[in-house]
Image (cartoon, helix red, strand yellow):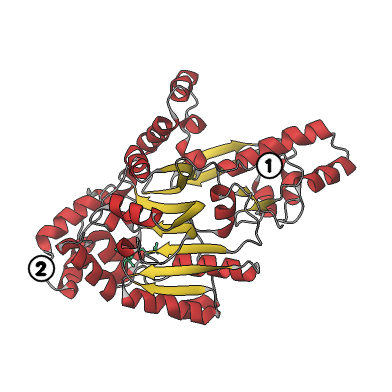
Amino acid sequence: MTDAADAALAAQYEALPYPHRDPRDEARRLIVGSPGLLREIDHWVFGAARPAARPLRALMAGGGSGDGTIMLAQQLAETGRPGTVTYLDRSAAATAVAKARAQARGLANIVWEQRSLLDLPGSGLGPFDYVDCCGVLHHLPDPAAGLRALVSVLAPGGGLGLMVYAPHGRTGVYMAQDALRLLAPADEAMPVRLDVARRVLKHLPESAWLRRNTLIADHVTGGDAGICDLLLNPRDVAFTVPELFRLLAGAGLRAVCLIEPLRYNPTAYLPDPKLRARAAALSPVERAALAEALCGNMSTHIVYCVRADDPVATPDPMAAISVPVARYTPAAELAAAIRPDHTLAFLFDGLRVPLALPPLAPALLRLVDGHRSVGEIAAEMARRGTAAEAFARAWGATFTAFESVNRLLLAAPSG
Ligand SMILES: C[S@@+](CC[C@H](N)C(=O)[O-])C[C@H]1O[C@@H](n2cnc3c(N)ncnc32)[C@H](O)[C@@H]1O
């Protein structure tokens, strides 16, 4: 199903691939983020149980200018892991940018598909072990139909990584969109609309929520593509936590993890015991909804999900053969940031959450190098005089704390 807004959306991403990227920048940096980071997929989607040697078939649906595709293909390539990343987008211009970026990196593990994700069922593409759809479903005429199309190419035991907009953190965006619908109607040429949008941004009254909202930056740092995507988008709907969970359930899916998990746990920042007890009595979805409503700073939801009836192994940080790995920031850097009072404060879009850690946490983190197993870390700590029980307590607490902020994960088994 497509409509006039969808045709306008297609034209927009043809004229202004999103986000704006210059392939020459590949020489100096890799853009990383969630969803779609290889270590996150290993841990959250496959429960650190899917062997690294098994080829990973990944689909980046609505891949845009290529951020997720380039990240995952690069991570597979540099770790020598087998697999292919299928990039799919209906925009020829976006595909061209993503291809140029892949070429700049010499990546040979990407398959290119220029077509609509709504045509996936019966397309002959797939099945895929991992399907990524970042910032796309909320632009579709029928997000539920889009999600079903993605699930139609999901391999048994596979999982998805999704990002959709969330309403509260986007406060001000929809008001500015309303204003621009009046001042720069959709039937005018894009250059004219962009000019009007820039003028509106320059003269936004100081009371405007968009001016106050420091979480949203695309209109400031994203160039024309950013302004267009944020403020002139023909369709853009945001999902609260309960709406997202209904969307997932409608496609036969269940969430395994919201990123970062701690943000969705209101007890992490409710010191009042009575409030904590009430929050603890809620269902997991209600707790996440409470976190969203209380904090008011979530502008997106990033969720890893699997088929509702698929069991996913629970990563076991206490198993001697498990290999802990830092998500991206090296564990030694995390160790260095721990304060003398054994806390580490995380800042999530203005929400400060202190992690309470055991005194042994820095020493343990310094032993996490992505190669040493938990058993080897335990043996090294024993050699330094830490009793097995004390190690188990400290390691369990350290891993759980850093896993809750998506900083410490378990690696895919090497076999
Ligand atoms: C906001 S961009 C997101 C790009 C990328 N996933 C990212 O996060 O950087 C949305 C992308 O979805 C693509 N898109 C929208 N509807 C689509 C459809 N039905 N089939 C395939 N791609 C679509 C657009 O062309 C655009 O490149």
**Rendering quadrant holding ligand 1:** bottom left
Cα distance in 3D space between marks 2 and 1: 56 Å
Q: Which mark is residue 184?
A: none
Q: Which residue shows up at 47% across the image and 40% down it?
A: 309
Q: Which residue shows up at 56% across the image and 38% down it?
A: 354
Identify residue type, mark 2.
Asp
Tell which circle, 2 or 1, labels the residue nearer the N-terminal end: 2
- Residue 205 visible to an observer of this rendering: no
Q: Which mark is residue 187?
A: 2
Q: Is residue 201 above or below residue 258?
A: below
Which of 142 and 235 lies nearest the eye of the viewer? 142
Q: Is residue 233 left or right of residue 405?
A: left
Q: Is residue 193 above or below residue 277?
A: below
- Observer-side mark, 2 or 1, equals 1
Answer with the quarter of the image where residue 63 lies: bottom left
Q: Which mark is residue 317?
A: 1
Q: Is residue 48 left or right of residue 363?
A: left
Quadrant where the N terminus is found in the figure:
bottom left
Q: Secondary structure at mark 1?
A: loop
Residue 353 x %, y %: 52, 38
Quadrant where the C terminus is found in the figure:
bottom right
Q: Is residue 145 left or right of residue 415?
A: left
Residue 348 x %, y %: 47, 46
Identify residue type, mark 1.
Pro
